[in-house]
Structure formats: structure tokens, C-alpha cells
Amino acid sequence: MEKVCILGLGYIGLPTAGLLAAKGFSVHGVDKNPKVVDAVNNSYPHIHEPGLSNLIKLTVQSGNLVASLEPVHADIFIITVPSLITKEHLPDITHIKEAIHAIAPYLIPGCLVIIETTVPVGTTEKIANWLSQLRRDLIIPSITSTISRIDKEKQIFLAHCPERVSPGRTLIELVENSRVIGGIDQLSGQKAYLFYKHFVCGELFITNARTAELTKLTENSFRDVNIAFANELSLICANLGINVWELLKLANSHPRVSILDPGPGVGGHCLPKDSWFIKHAAPELARIIHTAREINDCMPNQIIVQIKSKAAFFQEPVIACLGLTYKSNTDDLRESPALKIVKQLLDENVGEILIIEPHIDALPKALANHDRVKLVDLQEGLAQANLVVLLVAHDTFKNIEENILKKKVVVDTRGMWLLPD
Ligand SMILES: NC(=O)c1ccc[n+]([C@@H]2O[C@H](COP(=O)([O-])OP(=O)(O)OC[C@H]3O[C@@H](n4cnc5c(N)ncnc54)[C@H](O)[C@@H]3O)[C@@H](O)[C@H]2O)c1
């Protein structure tokens, strides 16, 4: 049984660990957060993802999945720790550096190191350099190296294979999505290909590490730019007195037009960050990408202006905010525009705020210091509010009766209810 050591048991690492353990690998999951390690070892995933609870229970109980604070010797190392951007929008790969330092003592000749985290272009080469410094006894391939027959016995392999799943569908997409594998050299690419072939039924494309890095950034930036186009149209429509949802329905009836939906901004851990990674790599050239970022970043403020103008109708506004997560049907609050909007409304004391977010049990820390906010259920929120703001298109909000909404002042940032103007 091949041994896999995975660093970072979050939204990506934990489902991957469970899946590999179910496929018969002996999986050693590592996280620097002891709470995560304890939760996994007690068969209790700390994140919500369809199918994950059962998978973790089965694989921990079978003995194929163990969590720990420290790595072990393994045949395959997978890095799924986060990459970040600083406040100044610069790439921060500190977690990756830490993870590479942590695994370095445990690498054995012939092992394969895979970076699944989305990274700035050139990071896999940087990792090869770090490993060459940390393990002078091993041969670490690089894009330029040719390895002699004797050295091959001391060689390890290194590849970047960015994760492409969408939370909420992670366990399905880990298997079904096609994947891009960027070997630091050809042999590393082939080694990684053989590994993914065990559990991926989507197509596997082998390329070099830099191309794989930019491919992933491009995918997320594509969505960021296209959402910015939709958001810009929504601002233009508001200015011209045109219903943007009707406009999009009509424009999208053209066989070669497919505009995405506008909304209150772009959040999550990935999309905003990845566009900044491209901007950082080519500051003079990434002009559309940069402008798109600026448009998406200004959307929460635009929505706040709309909400404030409607709240001004009431002497005592009671605002039901539907959804707090960064996208529909998830519990993930990272970089959520909805959360930014609510926080700003509270900071400006716009009214009493009722949060309706069926995917969380308690309000996040960012809102904890405010006393004019409560987490309530849908029924209570709709009964008490005079202003209803839809921020996230969770499925549960689809079936709210039109009769109820007609009695309220409504701001629908997702075009879910399409009420007549
Ligand atoms: N979440 C997504 O939808 C998604 C999709 C595709 C790609 N990705 C990529 O995957 C990366 C990870 O995302 P995520 O959502 O799983 O993050 P996450 O925050 O849910 O999980 C990361 C985990 O890594 C742990 N960690 C941090 N540094 C560590 C270290 N040095 N050693 C061991 N553990 C460490 C953290 O404690 C945390 O539990 C992202 O940065 C992104 O590049 C994410």
C-alpha cells in the first residue's frame, strides 16, 4: 500500500485525504492546527462538505486515514496549505515554505512531492531550490537539470497539480474534473500522472510547472474578469434605469453570448487572490485583470449605497440580510462580500440587522462586537424586517412566497426573485 502524506487538512486537503484513503492508500494527514487534527482523528470533519462526514468516519475507522501535527516518511507528499495575498495585494507563500521545511527531513529517494495549492508563477522552481538547500543528499530535479544514471537512485520528483474543485461538489469533482499536471521535469510529470490515474477519471494533461501554475491562475481570473463585466453592466443599467436581469436574459439569448451573473462582489479564498498573482507577475501587462479586480472590489460599496437609500424610507429600519457566505450553498465565509456589506451597515448604524444564514450556527467574530445584529431563522427574519436584502443565492431562499416579498422593500443582488419593478 503506497503511503501518502498530505499537509493542510482544509477544504481541499481533507476531502483529498479521505478520497485517497478510501481508494486504499495509507494516508497520513498533517495540519498545524491541533483542533483540526483532533477532529479528524475523532472521525469528525471540521468543515461542511456533502459526503465528507461519512467518508472521514469510514476511512479513520478503517485505519487508512490518520491525522497528526507532524509529517512522516511517505511515497507521495501533497501540499494543500493556503497561499495568500498581503494587504498590499502581494503574493504570500509563507505557509508553503513552512510546509516544505516540515516535509524536507522525511523525503526519501524516489518519492514524489506534489503542490496542489494555487501558487504564483515560478513557485515550483523556488520549491526545487529550497529542497536542494535543505536536502543536499538528494537530487532535486529542476527545469534545466539532466540527471545521470547514478544520481537517479537519489532522485526525488516534484510537480504542481493545481486543484480545481468547487466547494459543495468537492468529492465529485476530485474524481471527475480533468487536471493539469506541471512536472518540474518530464519524469516528475509522468510520475504524478501515474498517481492521479489511480483516482481521477477526468482527462490528465501533462505540461511544465510554470504553465500549470499560470493555467490555474488563468481559470480563476477568467471568472473574475467575466463577473466584473456583468457587475459593470449592472452599474450601467442602474444608471440608465434598465433592469439588468432582463437585459442579461435577452443578451444571453444570442447563441454566442454567455454573460455571467452580477452580484455584491467576488469573494472566497481563490478568485480575488489569483488575479492579484497574475497582476504581480506582469504588472504592466495585466490591465483588464487589474481593472476587473477594482470593479469587483467596489461592488460591496455600491450595494451598501442601494441599501442605505432604501433604508432611508423607514424611521427604524429592520434589515433582513439573506446569506452571509461568499457563494451559495456553502458555509465558507472567507473574503465574503456579504459579510463586508453587513459589517459596514453595522459600523454605519444603518438599522437593526437580522442575519439569515442557514449554513452557520453562530455569527462570525467580525460581527460579534455589534449589538444591533442577530442570527435568526428565515421565518422570523421575514416576519420582523421591513427591508429584505438578498446577498447570497442559497437554494433555500428560492421558495420564499412572492406575497411575503411584495409586502417588503427588497434589494435582490442576485436576481433570484425577479420581482416586477
Ligand atoms: N477552497 C477551494 O475552493 C480551493 C479550490 C481550488 C484550489 N484551492 C487551493 O487550495 C489551497 C488550500 O485551500 P483550502 O480551502 O483547503 O484552505 P483551508 O484554509 O481550508 O485549509 C488549509 C489548512 O492548512 C493548514 N496549514 C496551514 N499551514 C500549514 C502548515 N505549514 N502545515 C500544515 N498545515 C498547515 C491550516 O491549518 C488549514 O487547516 C488554497 O490556498 C488554494 O490555493 C482551494
Image (cartoon, grey):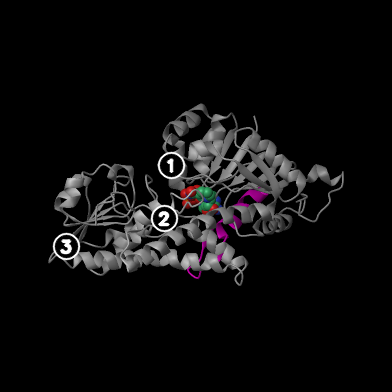
Instruction: State the CA–CA distance, disc 1 to disc 2.
Output: 15 Å
Q: In which image quadrant can residue 45 be found?
A: top left
Hey, what amino acid is under mark 1? Gly
Instruction: Judge: label 2 CB < 8 Å from ligand 1.
Output: yes
Residue 372: x, y in percent? Answer: 20, 61
Q: Tag 1 or tag 3, which sits nearer the N-term?
A: 1
Question: Which residue lies under the disc numbered 2?
Answer: 334
Instruction: State the CA–CA distance, disc 2 to disc 3.
Output: 28 Å
Neighbour tally class for label 1: few under 14, some 14-19, many 20 plus, Cα within 10 Å: some
Question: Which residue lies under the disc numbered 1?
Answer: 168
Q: Is residue 310 magenta?
A: no
Quick one: SS at disc 1?
Answer: loop
Q: Tag 2 or tag 1, which sits nearer the N-term?
A: 1
What range of the chain is rendered magenta?
83-105
Instruction: State the CA–CA distance, disc 3 to disc 1.
Output: 34 Å
Hey, what amino acid is under mark 2? Arg
Q: Is residue 405 left or right of residue 365?
A: left
Question: Which residue lies under the disc numbered 3?
Answer: 317
Quick one: SS at disc 3?
Answer: loop
Q: Where the C terminus falls, by quadrant?
A: bottom left
Q: Is residue 84 magenta?
A: yes
Q: Closer to the camera: disc 2 or disc 3?
A: 3
Residue 72: x, y in percent? Answer: 61, 42
Q: Is residue 8 visible?
A: yes
Q: Where the N terminus falls, by quadrant?
A: top right
